[in-house]
Image: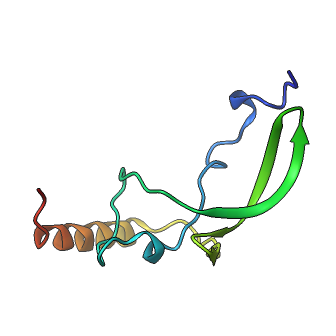
Amino acid sequence: MDPSVSPENTETGQDDLPVDIGTLEIDGVRPAVGDIVKLKVGGTISKIVNEVAWVTPETVNDAPLPAETPDATDDELMESAQAHDSAMMGRTLF
């Protein structure tokens, strides 16, 4: 097998895919970190090695990939977490 086809040969964070969070909402409720979601991804094959094809994502859930933004500040992360917590308080989970 080609050594480039190996989990050890990937960069950290390279597997993460930016997705517009609005396309992941269910009944207006945003997902939380750790939630499992299903995506429809479209893209272009960038490389084929033996039986493995690499795909460069171009769309997610029929929308273009959002522009990558710089890392959030601690204040922005705290504000987002508090907004999520507030939204969850009004939601009944069964």
Q: Position of residue 10 (x, y in %)?
A: 72, 38
Where residue 59 sits, quadrant-wise, is bottom right
Image position of 93 (left or right of 19): left
Q: How many marks are shown on the rendered structure?
A: 0
Residue 10, compared with residue 81, is above or below; it is above
Q: Position of residue 84 (x, y in %)?
A: 26, 69
Q: Position of residue 4 (x, y in %)?
A: 84, 31
| Residue that appears at 40% across and 51% down | 36
Image position of 58 (left or right of 47): left
| Residue that appears at 75% across and 63% down | 43
Residue 13, compared with residue 72, is above or below; it is above
Where residue 63 sits, quadrant-wise, is bottom right
Where residue 12 sits, quadrant-wise, is top right
81 or 30, which lies in front?
Answer: 30
Q: Position of residue 88 (x, y in %)?
A: 18, 67
Q: Quadrant of the C terminus?
A: bottom left
Image position of 57 (left or right of 48): left
| Residue that appears at 53% across and 65% down | 71
Q: Quadrant of the N terminus?
A: top right
| Residue that appears at 81% across and 44% down | 53
Q: Residue furthest top?
A: 1
Q: How is the image coloured?
A: rainbow
